[in-house]
Amino acid sequence: MFSALMKRRNLLLVALLVSCLNIDLFVRASAQELTVKASFAESAISSGEQITLQLSRPLQPSEGRIGVLIGTTDWTSLFSVAPDALVYTPQMPLPAGESEVIVYLVTGENDWREIARFPLRVLDAQPATPQPQDTMQNGNGSRKMEFKPSLTIGIKSQAAESHFPQENRPERETFADFTLQGSLQSNFTRGAFGSEMQFDIAGSSYRNEALRFAQEGNRAPRIDLASYLLQFQAGKAKIQMGHIAYGANRHLINSFSSRGVSLTFPITRRADFSIAAMNGSSIVGWDNFIGLSRRKHQMVTGTLGVEIFPERPGGLRIEGGLLHGSLLPINNFNQGNITDAEQSKGVSVRVIASDPSQRIRLDAGFARSRFNNPSDPLLNQSFNVVSVTEDARNARYIDAGFDILRDRPVSATRKASLTFNFRHETVAPLFRSVAAFTQADRFQNQFEAVANIADVTATVSHWRYNDNLDRIPSILKTLTRRNGVIIGAPLVSLFGDRANPSPWFPRVSYGYDRTHQFGASLPLNSDFAISHVPDQVSTNQNALAEWQFQKARFGYRFNHSFQNNQQTGRELSDLRNLVNGFTIGVTPHAKVDLNFDISLESAKNFETDRIDRLNRVGTNVNWLSSNRSTLTATVSTIFAGDVAGASESRNLELDVQWSYRFALERSRYRKVQGQFFVRYANRYARSLDSLFGFNNLTKFQTLNLGLSFTFF
């Protein structure tokens, strides 16, 4: 069967590629600074009210994800995510009283960067909107119990496989594995008391996919505890046990996430205190259930907060924190790297302030951390290693914003806003905290102006950075100067009729970024020559235009980047990249969606006088043949090579999947949902290089089937 499919592959690809005209809309968001607006920022709400966090633009997958903390609890998983918004539809009551909602941008390195903070005032503790759950409630509505179990059992298999050459034979050519995912959630409230519980388990019959296989190998349990959280609340006092996140000082402890215990309670009307003890790395499994079994591998931290104006949370809040952290050479359960024993102790102070209208905002912090790197015989390997000197260093930051104009009318239908932001950060050399990811030895200032006139947005920024804060003469000091401009606008708001907009006016955006990185001077008493001192100017330009019609959409994107090397002796080591991309989306029927893409890329190396080109053509088809059946097909091909013809490569990819969903339901408490899928994948790659004399060909085909059942 597979040999016949191989013979038909080129005919199939050609037939599908003939319809390719343009690129998938994976860059539909305009490149502008990400900001957040909250639906609850201006008024108090009830505990069962829906809340929305509106993003200024859709978040690109390469940027990371959004994290949301309410108080010190991570609520991210409870929000439903849309392209440009996060919506919380109450499944459990929002915390009564006054608290804060903190929005983070979480990157792939698990770096949590705060992008917004809003006061949350909940007037009551009324039950959330009823959900299809078991509920017990007395006549006066003062008690509520919710119980939500979920269990998914699946089978995934690879029925057939072929490969070329033989060296590419996979570890398992065919297989059939059982998978399991289970969740148990409960929520109980009675008056001012509330409790919440959530347990998540995961399992696989294939031990290499067990949660702790990287740590335990063949001893890893096939079914294991993925995460859990127990929370009890009485008024404003709250205790949590399980997988929690803690910390709001970016340099000392910043949203550190692990298994542990935390306690938060009010001291007075103005003051509150929280304390947490957590495991030093991310863990899963039933072992070390609380997370505190290793005394030398944990974080103990606490925060005292004082609201100077308790009637206006966030008007002026002062927080003081302590941290005692100790790490053993133990990896996170899903991360493998070389680690070392580390210890740090630190204190922090944070000030949050704003005027009553939120026109002026300030977030400033200071941290002092004493770091120690104790000797580790396993790493020393009997060598005479110089011990690291224990030292205390400082770090500070200031984030300030001022709305110069806020919704100022400029015409009968248009308003203007202008905001100035200032960000400062200084991290001393050798600064280190075991509970925060911080780059030491850096000084930076950022100035930013954000303007909005009707639907037109513009951001102008200037960024200055340097290192070697101790001014050590024998160490190279590097300076960075960066300037950026981002403009985005729907042209219909400038030239068209806003009451009757024409789809022929696109939404456009343009971004320009210039970065100059250079060495301050030639280091003394070093082996550096003047040709070793870097001096480089990089520019990057992006333009995007998008048209949206009733059943079609079209987009064009342009990128030009140039790396100008001004370093002595390397003036010709310049690089230039040029990208032109086109996208077309067509929806001929409510159940059919077609996407096409073309990307033309060129890269020139001026030092070697070499030009490389890469052309990508792809198409994607989604056909919802019924409310239960979906067919998806994706075809793409990439042609790459240099203009001189010394090397070339070609890649072809074909993916086809059909899935069918079904459900059996007797009542809202007893139901079964399921899904069956069949997936075929075909990969072809050939690369030739006359300079190095190689000619590689690889082929790979798989046929996968899966079936899953979800209970409750």
Image (spheres, rainbow, N blue to C red):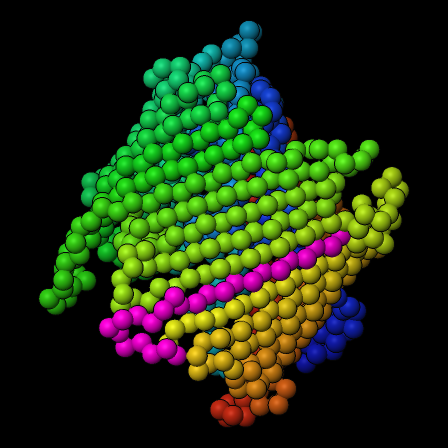
Residue 494 at x, y = what percent? 81, 47
Q: Is residue 3 visible?
A: no
Residue 666 occupies quadrant: top right
Residue 464 at x, y = what percent? 46, 55
Magenta includes 518? Answer: yes
Q: Is residue 104 above or below residue 71?
A: below
Q: What count of labels does the image hold? A: 0
Q: Is residue 238 above or below residue 159?
A: above
Residue 592 at x, y = what percent? 78, 54
Q: Is residue 93 above or below residue 389?
A: above
Q: Nearer the viewer, residue 584 or 157?
A: 584
Q: Is residue 616 above or below residue 658?
A: below
Residue 613 appears left or right of 384: right
Q: Quadrant of the C terminus?
A: top right
* Residue at (20, 49) in percent of width and height: 391
* Residue at (55, 10) in percent of width and height: 141
Q: Which residues are magenta?
A: 507-531
Q: Nearer the viewer, residue 392 or 647?
A: 392
Q: Quadrant of the N terminus?
A: bottom right
Residue 271 at x, y = what percent? 36, 20
Residue 32 appears left or right of 192: right
* Residue at (74, 58) in percent of width and height: 545
Residue 439 appears left or right of 400: left
Magenta includes 580? Answer: no
Q: Nearer the viewer, residue 315 or 503?
A: 315
